[in-house]
């Protein structure tokens, strides 16, 4: 069920930055402030993997090792948007990026995808010179 909307993808050179946005579709009108929201990515020929998650209760965030220190997940509750700031981008970051509203957000990465309830349609990020 696709009812979140991602934007902000594009082509960027290695070392560059992009900021992705995730918001609710106008039809769904989901208040992301009260949802755990995660960012995933899926490279060509690979499985979709969770990379960052932000909790609804206290705003704590979690990252996988390949993006920790380079990516930052944050919320703008006034605009009902969750962002993924991506810095120091590498060619291996090339993928389609998805956001998801999910029931779980924490250290146990294996639980992320199974708890995802609502997805976006994805936005393409290409890192290339």
Image: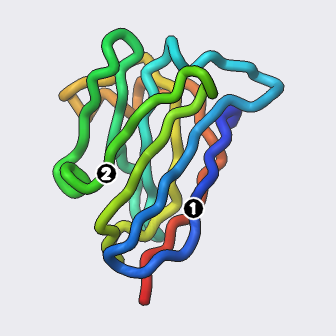
Name which of mark 2 and mark 1 comes first in the sequence: 1
Residue 78 visible in the current orientation = yes
Give the position of the C terminus as an image quadrant: bottom left
Is there any visible trace of residue 1 in the rendered image?
Answer: no
Image position, residue 75 (x, y; %): 46, 29
* Residue 47 occupies quadrant: bottom left
Instruction: Name the residue that disc number 2 marks.
Output: 71
How many residues crowd mark 1 within 10 Å: few (<14), some (14–19), many (20+)?
some
**Coloration mode:** rainbow
Q: In the picture, which quadrant includes the N terminus?
A: top right
Packing grade of label 2 (10 A; few <14, some 14-19, many >=20) is many
* Element class at badge 2: strand
The image shows a total of numbered marks equal to: 2
Say which of 124 and 7 sits in front: 7
In this rendering, would 76 be left or right of 72? right
Q: Position of residue 104 (x, y in %)?
A: 36, 19
Return the x and y of residue 94 as percentages of the image width and height. Answer: 43, 70
Q: Nearer the viewer, residue 99 or 57?
A: 57
Residue 92 marker: none
The vertical placement of 8 against 110, above or below, is below
Camera-side residue of 90 and 96? 90
**Image point (34%, 69%), residue name:** 89
* Number of the label disc, if any, that sits on residue 9: 1
Q: Label 2, label 1: how many angstroms apart (C-alpha)?
A: 14 Å
Q: Secondary structure at mark 1?
A: loop
């Amino acid at each position: 069920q696709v009812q979140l909307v991602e934007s902000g993808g594009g082509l960027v050179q290695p070392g560059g930055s992009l900021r992705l946005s995730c918001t609710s579709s106008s039809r769904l009108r989901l208040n992301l402030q009260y949802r755990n929201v995660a960012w995933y990515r899926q490279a060509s020929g690979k499985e979709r993997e969770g990379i960052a998650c932000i909790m609804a209760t206290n705003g704590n965030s979690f990252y996988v090792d390949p993006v920790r220190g380079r990516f930052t997940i944050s919320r703008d509750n006034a605009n009902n948007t969750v962002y993924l700031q991506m810095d120091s981008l590498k060619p291996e970051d090339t993928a389609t990026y998805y956001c998801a509203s999910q029931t779980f957000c924490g250290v146990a990465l294996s639980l992320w995808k199974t708890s995802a309830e609502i997805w976006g349609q994805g936005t393409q990020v290409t890192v290339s010179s």
